[in-house]
């Protein structure tokens, strides 16, 4: 008997199938069989498999008589044909790590486990060809773990894909566990059945599977705008609910996962869809969310909870508004209510036994603490060319200062146009833009073809805020004449366009032919000195500022989590402000703009100057009077760092204790 049976499935995927098959044939564990099940392809997939089988006796080829339209039928056929002690699954568009079978097989044998979960590497290619690689649910795979049941490690519910796991075949046969036919997201139900049936479950940190996602290609599971996609997802969850009727603790974790992950994904789709397309998705999603107990919603982030409230009450307009914050980068287009902006809106009534006030409480977002420069205002270009701004905290002042900025992507602000308030009503400001009076901010003309974005720049004291301007599908302003400030042979007009996301774009066109333009002087501020580009890097006042400035490591690119950013935000997010470097080993915290910001290498010195205390293991910085020596214990990886002479704090707990002492002294 072979140790591992690998079930490889595919349909009309002859371009990627050879890569997947080669990764299975190259496995370092030799006692395997490869059961290739073709779902009645019409391309040459079957020929590729049969040709490979001629040269490799480990490969067995099977073709379904008719196309099943999903992954369940071919996988189930593979289970029927398998002879190994264990079973694994692979899709034709993905691949195994070379040691996938060996690592999972040996772990299962050593742990005496019925199922072992390895890490999956998700490789996403966006529509522009950019590639991003991430570990799927990395926190689950931080260390080796063995548990006796799903209740001991409910985080397993977040890793329900079937392809990064090894299953004891005897368990599947005895418990009659297979994939549900005719439904998408079949992995979730299959994996839950396995978790519930398993006497022991193992987890290992090694990457065993490479999961390729191409955003530009069609995929039945990635096409969330299709109603069938959502209906199948909900049907799978309803079947999971039936399995968990007598397991309330696991059902609770499963529901939290649904809200945080699946519901959040479909709300993103709703946010990106037009009203007609979104309506059916909203109704389907709301109907299922109505079945989830109210206490579950306590465990989702406040912005998502607000959006789910409006979904449940069927308020499409306010749902889109809430999603602008949660899915649109933190844009706030409502006037916040309550003391210091703690309430999203002053609504009344209740849903699922909880008051509207409870659902709409956003105290934990600490919105008033978001630095002015990092706030996300919503600026909307109206049909008459005016701009409407939501002053969500009501603190822009009686005479707010603003200008329209046309910025080129590489060199920054180039042209500005003055703005003045013409109306103020219930937290909404209406600005008049002087489109006919542009000012050139750089000592050069614009070349035809140069382009960039359009922003509203707000100024409050020494602080500057710059946010996109949102435009309707039909632009009320088509162009801007800049001949008055154009240099000879440079562009003399700006034409505007709308991005797919709804923001305003510009591009320079034409050419000024007037020789007199050589003599024109660009209008400048009082002394004739060219206007300078505003500083984009600002930090808030009123709170102590800490900077994490570690040694630079250029030769080591794997995950080195040298700073627990989430724990810092939890303990000090309100009382202090954190600057962290843009480095791959610094985990990016989620939705805590009030607590931190990143700095680039070019801003390092400026950031150091702004900080009250410097958390570092850089020998050069440890000479500073405000340095805190911190070098987290990284195991063998510590040898990549230069040693430091003085005693350093080596744990996050020790660092937090020291920071608490400093903050207490600062307050006194």
Image (spheres, grey):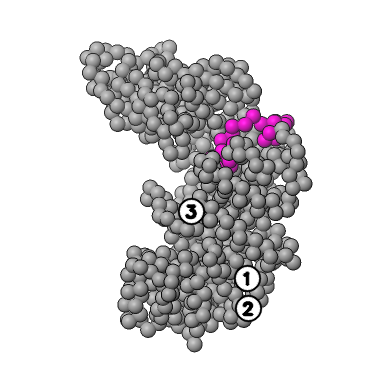
For the stretch drawn in magenta, the main secondary structure is loop
Quick check: 310 above or below 210? above
Q: Residue at x 42, y 22 (%)?
A: 416
Check contact, mark 2 vs mark 1: CB within 8 A. yes
Whole-number angstrom distance, CA of label 2 to CA of label 3: 33 Å
Q: Secondary structure at mark 3?
A: loop
10 Å crowding of disc 1: few (<14), some (14-19), many (20+)? some
Residue under the point 38% across and 69% down: 41
Which callout, 2 or 3, points at the residue further toward the start of the chain? 2
The range drawn in magenta is 321-345
Q: Is residue 555 above or below residue 42?
A: above
Q: CA distance from mark 3 to mark 1?
A: 26 Å
Q: Is residue 650 above or below residue 306?
A: below
Q: Which corner quadrant of the image does residue 347 belong to? A: top right
Image location of residue 335, percent across then percent down: 64, 29
Report whether 281 appears left or right of 56: right
Q: Nearest the camera: 132 or 504?
A: 504
Q: Is 539 in the magenta? A: no
Question: Label for residue 179?
Answer: none
Would you say residue 466 is visible in this rendering?
no
Residue at the image point whose x is 63% and y is 78% from the top: 175
Residue under label 3 = 223
Counting residues from the N terminus, which is met first, the one under dot 2 or under dot 1? 2
Residue 149 horizontal/vertical position (percent): 68, 70
Image mark for residue 175: 2
User: The residue tagged with tag 1: helix, strand or loop?
Assistant: helix
- Residue 204 placed where, x, y %? 56, 69
Q: Quadrant of the C terminus?
A: top right
Is 227 rendered above or below residue 40? Answer: above
Residue linked to disc 1: 193
């Amino acid at each position: 008997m072979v140790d591992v049976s690998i079930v490889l499935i595919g349909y009309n995927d002859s371009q990627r199938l050879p890569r997947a098959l080669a990764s299975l044939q190259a496995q370092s564990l030799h006692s395997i069989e490869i059961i290739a099940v073709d779902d009645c392809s019409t391309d040459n997939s079957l020929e590729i498999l049969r040709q490979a089988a001629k040269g490799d006796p480990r490969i067995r080829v099977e073709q379904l008589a008719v196309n099943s339209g999903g992954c369940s039928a071919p996988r189930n056929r593979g289970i029927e044909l398998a002879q190994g002690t264990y079973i694994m699954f692979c899709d034709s568009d993905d691949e195994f790590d070379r040691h996938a079978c060996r690592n999972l097989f040996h772990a299962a044998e050593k742990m005496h486990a019925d199922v072992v979960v390895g890490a999956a590497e998700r490789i996403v290619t966006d529509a522009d060809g950019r590639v991003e690689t991430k570990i799927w649910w990395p926190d689950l795979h931080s260390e080796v773990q063995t548990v006796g049941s799903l209740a001991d490690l409910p985080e397993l519910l977040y890793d329900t894909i079937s392809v990064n796991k090894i299953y004891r075949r005897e368990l599947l046969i005895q418990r009659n566990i297979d994939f549900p036919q005719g439904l998408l997201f079949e992995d979730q139900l299959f994996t839950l059945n396995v978790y519930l049936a398993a006497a022991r479950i193992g987890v290992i940190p090694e990457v065993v599977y490479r999961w390729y996602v191409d955003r530009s290609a069609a995929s039945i599971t990635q096409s969330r705008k299709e109603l069938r996609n959502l209906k199948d997802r909900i049907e799978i969850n309803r079947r999971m609910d039936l399995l968990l009727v007598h397991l309330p603790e696991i059902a609770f974790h499963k529901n939290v996962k649904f809200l945080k992950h699946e519901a959040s994904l479909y709300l993103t789709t709703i946010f990106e869809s037009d009203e007609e397309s979104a309506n059916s998705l909203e109704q389907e999603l709301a109907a299922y969310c109505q079945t989830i107990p109210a206490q579950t919603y306590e465990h989702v982030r406040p912005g998502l909870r607000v959006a789910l409230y409006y979904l449940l009450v069927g308020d499409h307009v306010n749902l889109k508004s809430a999603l602008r914050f949660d899915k649109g980068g933190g844009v706030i287009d409502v006037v916040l209510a309550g003391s210091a902006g703690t309430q999203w809106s002053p609504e009344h009534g209740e849903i699922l036994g909880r008051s509207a006030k409870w659902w709409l409480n956003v105290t934990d977002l600490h919105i008033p603490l978001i630095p002015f420069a990092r706030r996300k205002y919503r600026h909307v270009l109206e049909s008459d060319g005016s701009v409407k701004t939501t002053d969500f905290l009501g603190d822009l002042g009686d005479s707010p200062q603003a200008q329209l900025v046309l910025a080129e992507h590489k060199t920054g602000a180039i042209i500005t146009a003055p703005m003045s308030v013409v109306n103020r009503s219930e937290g909404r400001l209406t600005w008049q833009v002087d489109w006919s009076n542009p000012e050139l901010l750089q000592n050069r003309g614009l070349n035809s073809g140069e382009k960039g974005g359009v922003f509203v720049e707000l100024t409050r004291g020494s602080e500057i805020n710059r946010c996109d301007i949102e435009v309707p599908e039909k632009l009320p302003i088509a162009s801007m004449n800049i001949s008055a400030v154009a240099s000879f042979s440079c562009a003399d007009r700006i034409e505007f366009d709308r991005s797919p996301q709804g923001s305003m774009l510009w591009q320079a066109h034409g050419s000024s032919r007037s020789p007199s333009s050589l003599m024109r002087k660009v209008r400048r501020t009082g002394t004739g000195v060219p206007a300078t580009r505003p500083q984009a890097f600002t930090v808030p006042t009123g709170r102590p500022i800490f900077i994490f400035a570690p040694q630079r490591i250029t030769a080591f690119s794997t995950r080195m989590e040298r700073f627990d950013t989430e724990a810092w935000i939890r303990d000090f997010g309100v009382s202090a402000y954190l600057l962290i470097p843009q480095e791959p080993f610094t985990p990016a915290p989620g939705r805590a703009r009030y607590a931190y910001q990143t700095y680039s290498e070019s801003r390092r010195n400026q950031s150091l100057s702004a900080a009250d205390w410097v958390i570092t293991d850089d020998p050069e910085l440890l000479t500073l009077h405000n340095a805190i020596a911190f070098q987290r214990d990284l195991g063998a990886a510590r040898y990549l760092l230069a040693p430091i002479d003085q005693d350093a704090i080596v744990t996050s707990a020790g660092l937090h204790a020291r920071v608490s002492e400093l903050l207490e002294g600062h307050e006194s």
